[in-house]
């Protein structure tokens, strides 16, 4: 169990550090940044789908079978992330931004992002309760998803009136909320009987929702054939990355 805690805490610490990616983006041209995000979103969608269908669900079915409770647990993950995304996108604003006043939508975004990161930690912790290889695969999936997410959050904070330095550190502090999620998952797995199956199904539902409802619709905004083929290639590459991680078992 100590090994599981160590791996899980190191994983969320590394994922939290991704929030500091804004440091490397401050001098990046807008066109280059858009191309980078285009690549990352495509890869991330494939990785999340791959982790859900290649690692999480097969482990779940092998250990717990597949019945109505499993279906409801997967749907609970989808529902929770639907609510989180609603909070994050609830960004109505009626105030002009300046260096002192932050837009109300920034506060809403930070609340949603905090919940999002806590659930990410919960997902990582749940995956390590199954095995270290599944935990590593899920950490990679979360990390790849977090890169475009953190870039977006950084931009929201800047747009809302934060200075670049303040936006960077607030983003980092919010990212640390994933530690709360991973600790909660590990404690629940240790003290609450047979909750690992629920957490695993919940995680699979969360990943399916993020990929299908959040990332893939973004990819459909690109209609050029050459770039669409690039998206497809990276999506498939993400799935193959998850396939390759099966060799860790």
Image: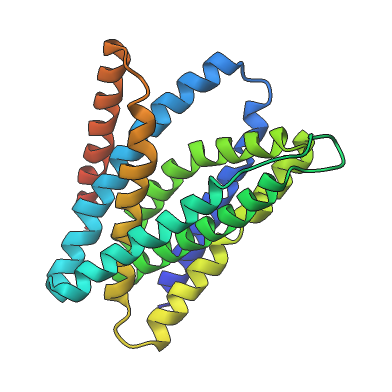
Q: Quadrant of residue 42?
A: top left
x and y, in percent, of residue 185 in the image: 44, 73
Left or right: 225 with respect to 6?
Answer: left
Q: Quadrant of residue 204?
A: bottom left
Left or right: 42 with respect to 174?
Answer: left
Residue 115, placed above or below residue 72: above
Left or right: 210 with respect to 13?
Answer: left
Viewer can see residue 2: no
In the rendered image, the residue lying farthest to the front is 94
Q: Nearer the viewer, residue 231 or 28?
A: 231
Count of numbered circles on the image:
0
Q: Quadrant of the N terminus?
A: bottom left
The structure residue drawn at horizontal position 71% and vertical position 34%, both measured from the top left corner, is 158
Left or right: 115 with respect to 92?
Answer: left
In the rendered image, the residue lying farthest to the right is 100
x and y, in percent, of residue 83 in the image: 45, 58
Viewer can see residue 21: yes
Residue 102, placed above or below residue 83: above
Residue 229, placed above or below residue 136: above
Q: Nearer the viewer, residue 14 or 29?
A: 29
x and y, in percent, of residue 171 in the image: 66, 47
Figure coloring = rainbow
Residue 1, placed above or below residue 102: below
Q: Quadrant of the C terminus?
A: bottom left
x and y, in percent, of residue 17 in the image: 59, 47
The structure residue drawn at horizontal position 46% and vertical position 71%, both measured from the top left corner, is 5
The structure residue drawn at horizontal position 55% and vertical position 49%, both measured from the top left corner, is 88
């Amino acid at each position: 169990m100590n090994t599981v805690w160590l791996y899980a805490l190191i994983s969320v610490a590394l994922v939290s550090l991704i929030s500091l990616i804004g440091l490397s983006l401050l001098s990046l041209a807008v066109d280059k940044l858009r191309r980078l995000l285009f690549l990352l979103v495509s890869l991330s969608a494939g990785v999340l789908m791959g982790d859900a269908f290649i690692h999480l669900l097969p482990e779940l079915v092998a250990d717990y079978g597949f019945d109505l409770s499993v279906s409801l647990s997967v749907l609970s993950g989808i529902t929770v992330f639907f609510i989180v995304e609603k909070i994050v996108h609830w960004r109505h604003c009626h105030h002009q931004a300046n260096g002192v006043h932050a837009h109300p939508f920034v506060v809403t975004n930070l609340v949603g992002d905090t919940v999002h990161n806590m659930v990410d930690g919960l997902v990582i912790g749940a995956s390590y309760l199954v095995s270290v290889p599944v935990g590593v695969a899920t950490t990679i999936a979360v990390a790849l998803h977090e890169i475009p997410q953190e870039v977006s959050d950084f931009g929201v904070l800047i747009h809302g009136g934060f200075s670049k330095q303040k936006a960077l550190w607030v983003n980092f502090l919010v990212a640390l909320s994933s530690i709360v999620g991973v600790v909660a998952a590990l404690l629940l797995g240790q003290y609450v009987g047979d909750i690992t199956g629920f957490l695993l199904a919940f995680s699979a539902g969360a990943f399916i929702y993020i990929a299908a409802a959040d990332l893939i619709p973004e990819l459909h905004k690109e209609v050029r054939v050459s770039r669409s083929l690039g998206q497809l290639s990276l999506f498939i590459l993400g799935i193959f990355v998850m396939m390759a991680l099966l060799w860790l078992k």
